[in-house]
Image (spheres, helix red, strand yellow):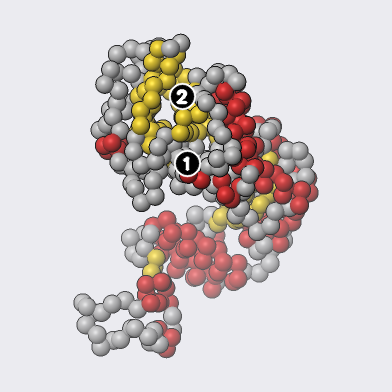
Amino acid sequence: MSNRPLRFIHAADFHLEQPPSGIAAVPDHLRESFLESPWLAAERVFEAVLSEEAEFLVLSGDLLHPLRTGPRGPLFLAEQFERLAQRAIPVYWAAGRVDPPELWPSVVPLSDNVHVFPAGRPEAINYLRNGVPAARLVGAGRLRGHKMRASEFEPDPAGLFTIAVVHGSATSESLRARDIDYWALGGNHTRTTLFTSPHTAHYPGTSQGRQPEHCGAHGCTLVQVDESRKLRTTLIPCDALRWQAEHVASEPSLTREGLETRLRDRVERLRESMPESDLLLSWTIAGSGSLATHLRRGRLALELLEMLRNQFGAMSPAAWSVAMEIEPAVTAPAEWLEQDTICGAFLREFRQEQLAPEKPIVLTDYLPPELADKEPSKRESEDPQTRQPGLWEELAEISDPATRESVLREAAMLGADLLSGEEALP
C-alpha cells in the first residue's frame, strides 16, 4: 500500500532533572552551561519540529522527573507543548521510568494537542491530515515491573503506516516479527538503529549528552517517509554542551611547538564546525619518541592542558579541555628492544607476551613465592580439578584480548620510563 509522504520528529530521554557530570571539577564560567544544557537541548527539539515543518512529534519517555525538577519542569514542557499547539502540531508521548503520568501535577494542564499513552497497555490513535487518517500510532507508557512485550503491538489492519511508541528494550527478532513500520523507542541514551529493513527500529538517544562517554552530537531524529513507505532518519543536533573525544598522533620527530600547533588547529576547526555548542574535550595523544615519553611523565601534559584552557576555555562558545591521556605506541621502538640493557631485556619480555594473545595474564605468577603462598584460599593440597580459585586469582587474571593488550602496553612503557634516564625535550 502506498501512502502520501510523512514527516515527523522522534525524541526521547530529555532527563531535565539530570545535569551533565563526570568531570572532577566544573570551571566557574561553565557551571550555568552545565545546569542549563538539558533544558536548552530540549527546547531545541521543539524548535526543530517547527523549523523542519514536522507534522507531529513523537516522545518515547524519560522527559523529566516532575518532583526532581520542581515546578520548572512541568511548566517548561507545558510551554513547549503550547508552542506546537499554536501551529496545530500533535504530540504523542509514551512515558518511561521517570515520567509516569501520575507524577504530572494536576495544576499544570497539558494542551489539547498532547496525547499521553496509558501505562502498561498499548493504545492506538490515528494521526489525521485534513481529517483523513494518514498514520497510526500505537503506544504504551512504561509500567513499573512490566516488561515491554512486542507481541502486544499490532500494525494497522487497513495498511496505514504504523508507528509503535514505547520506552524499553526488546530483541530485534521480536520487534521485526510485528510488521510495525517504525518502532519509536526510548531508554537508550546513545542514538541507535536496531534494523532498517524492511522496517525500522530506532532510539534517538538523549538530546543532551551527560557523561564523557556520550561523545559526539546528540539531539532528535527527523523521520521522513516517502510514497512507497521508504523511510529515512536524520540526526538533528540539539545539544548545548558537547563531549568530544579527540585523538592526536605524535610521531617521533614531533616537537612540543608542533604538538601545540596541532592541538590549537584542532580546537579551532571544532569550534568552527559546532558554533552553537560549548565543547568538553578529552584528548588522547598516541605515539612514541622523546615527546611522548615526556607526556607520559605528566608535567608536559598538564602544561598543554593549561595552555588549551587559557586560550579556548573562556571563549563563547567555550572549548574546555577536560583531560589528556597518553596512549603508548603498539610496540616499543626497535632500537629500544635491541638495547643490551635491563630496559631492553624488560621490553623483550613484554614483547613475547604480546606475541601470545591467547595466553591469559595471571598477575599472581609475578608475585614472589612467599607472597603467593599467603593467599588465604590457595591450598596446594586441594584437588586441582575441584579447587575454587582464590580471591587473588579471580582479580588478577586478564584474559580479554583488548584489556590484555592495553595492560601490556601501559606496563611496558611505564617500565621503560622508570628504567630510562631523562631525555631532552625536542
Residue 67 % position (x, y)? 57, 49
Task: Report the residue at 35% width, 20% height from top.
Answer: 161
- Which image quadrant is residue 273 in? top right
- Amino acid carrying label 2: it is Val
**Neighbours of disc 2 within 10 Å: few (<14), some (14-19), many (20+):** some
Distance, label 2 to label 1, CA atoms, is: 26 Å
User: In the image, which is nearer the foreground, mark 2 or mark 1?
Assistant: 1
Kind of element beneath mark 2: strand
Q: Return the residue nearer the eye: 258 or 270.
A: 270
Q: Is residue 199 visible?
A: no
| Residue 157 rendering spot, x and y as whole percentages | 26, 21
> Residue sitting at 74 percent across and 56 percent down?
303
Q: Which mark is residue 101?
A: 1
As displayed, is residue 310 above or below residue 128?
below
Q: Quadrant of residue 391?
A: bottom left
Residue behind mark 2? 223
